[in-house]
């Protein structure tokens, strides 16, 4: 159920021989990501449960079945910025109804991230995924109420 862009990322990771190369790639993805404006780094966008400071700013574009999910994010830690970029690749552009159904941890396991992240980073990724899913689900609940 991965996005084509995420499938491409998984393929790239298959070609990277060791975890250090993959780690560097994740960090590069974070560096390439557009920074979140300071005006959006507010408590409402802060993700609790992360060791680093993390903000996600979800957006829903369109209406009804055509509504698409997107988000922007940022962190004060480079590896976490990269993990946000990975999650963006997984979720961006999906129909909102699909977001809560994505097995994000299973998809991230395809990249080997589950084996190489500290427990604090893994908890942070789970917290980010929970926030994204909750945002999409809240939107669905409002539009189907």
Image (cartoon, grey):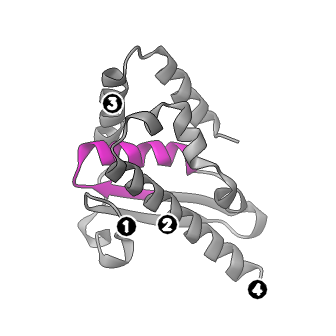
Asked if disc 2 and disc 1 are in contact, CB closer than 8 Å, the reply is: yes
Asked if disc 1 and disc 3 are in contact, CB closer than 8 Å, the reply is: no
Task: Give the main secondary structure of the magenta stretch.
Answer: helix
Q: Which mark is residue 145?
A: 4
For residue 54, side relative to residue 98 (left or right): left
4 vs 1, front mark: 1
Give the Cα distance between marks 2 and 1: 7 Å
Q: Is residue 22 visible?
A: yes
Give the Cα distance between marks 1 and 3: 22 Å
In the structure shown, which secondary structural element does the residue marked by tag 1 occupy? loop
Q: Quadrant of the N terminus?
A: top right
Residue neighbourhood size for the residue with mark 4, other residues' Cα within 10 Å, grouped as few (<14), some (14–19), many (≥20):
few
Outermost residue toward the bottom in this view: 145
Residue identifier under label 3: 23
Give the Cα distance between marks 4 and 3: 43 Å
Give the Cα distance between marks 3 and 2: 24 Å
Image location of residue 105, percent across then percent down: 55, 46
Q: Of callouts 2 and 1, which one flags the residue occurring earlier in the amino acid sequence?
A: 1
4 vs 3, front mark: 3
Q: Of callouts 1 and 3, which one flags the residue occurring earlier in the amino acid sequence?
A: 3
Look at 32% across and 47% down and name the residue there: 81
Q: Of callouts 4 and 1, which one flags the residue occurring earlier in the amino acid sequence?
A: 1
Report the magenta residues as a range: 72-92
State the residue in front, 25 or 122: 122
Residue identifier under label 2: 131
Residue 117 among those drawn in magenta: no
Residue identifier under label 1: 47
């Amino acid at each position: 159920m991965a996005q084509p862009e995420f499938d491409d990322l998984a393929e790239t990771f298959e070609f990277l021989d060791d975890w250090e190369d993959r780690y560097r790639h994740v960090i590069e993805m974070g560096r390439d990501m557009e920074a979140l404006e300071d005006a959006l780094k507010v408590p409402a966008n802060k993700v609790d449960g992360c060791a680093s400071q993390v903000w996600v700013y979800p957006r829903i574009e369109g209406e009804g079945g055509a509504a698409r999910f997107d988000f922007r994010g940022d962190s004060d830690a480079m590896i976490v910025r990269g993990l946000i970029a990975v999650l963006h690749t997984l979720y961006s552009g999906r129909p909102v109804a699909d977001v809560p159904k994505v097995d994000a941890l299973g998809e991230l396991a395809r990249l080997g991230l589950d084996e190489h992240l500290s427990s604090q980073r893994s908890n942070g990724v789970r917290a980010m995924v929970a926030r994204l899913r909750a945002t999409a689900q809240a939107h669905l609940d409002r539009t189907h109420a």
